[in-house]
Amino acid sequence: MLAQYVRAQLALASISAVVYSVSMAFLHYPYPLVLGIVGGALEFIPIAGWLIAAAMMLLGGWLAGAPWIWMAVVIAVWKTVEGVVVSPRIMGHRLALEPITVLFALMAGGQIGGLLGVILSVPAAAVLRILWLERSGGENAAAAS
């Protein structure tokens, strides 16, 4: 289950790197591929990673005279779409959870445990799902005999 979680995180980071790179290339940023890859890699750091990446990309655009305000809009839109649509679907698919379950797990984990709760909520939901299936599977086998 942990391997599936890491694969899902890698997929999300890769998609973010592509979105960032393409957006910066379209906006004529210097070194869009490098900045996009670094931005995607920083997605592995919960909460602070994307903030560091956004600051780095926006500062680079401002210093280069690129339209950094449009990049800020792209980042805001992408993070919203990623958090509401993309992440729950990828995490849910990889961990065999419904997207709504992933959303609720993230919200509950954040309320209960803050940053650590957000980090651990989806793997915990996946483990609870496995335990539930094992329990109900055992009862069904006993009832069948």
Image (cartoon, rainbow, N blue to C red):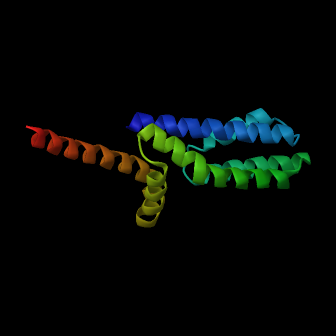
Residue 103 pos. (x, y %): 49, 55
In the image as oriented, which residue stretches furthest toward the front? 144
Q: Is residue 145 above or below residue 119?
A: above
Quarter occupied by the N terminus? top left
Please tell me which residue lies in front, 93 or 19: 93
Near-viewer residue (83 or 59): 83
Percent position of residue 15, x then y: 64, 38
Which quarter of the rendered picture does the C terminus lie within?
top left
Query: Which residue occupies the extreme left position in the image?
Result: 145
Relative to 84, 125 lies left or right = left
Left or right: residue 56 versus residue 107 is right
Which residue is most to the bottom?
A: 111
Query: Which residue sits at x=37%, y=46%?
Result: 126
Quarter-of-image position of residue 22: top right
User: Is residue 5 among the parts visible in the rendering?
Assistant: no
- Going by the image, does 127 lie left or right of 83? left
Look at the image and tell me whether residue 90 can be seen: yes
Q: Quadrant of residue 112?
A: bottom left
Count of numbered circles on the image: 0
Q: Name the residue at 65% across, 51% down.
A: 81
The spot of residue 61 in percent (x, y) is 84, 47
At 69% across and 35% down in the image, what residue appears?
37
Q: Residue at x 54, y 50 (%)?
A: 46
Q: Position of residue 25 (x, y in %)?
A: 83, 37
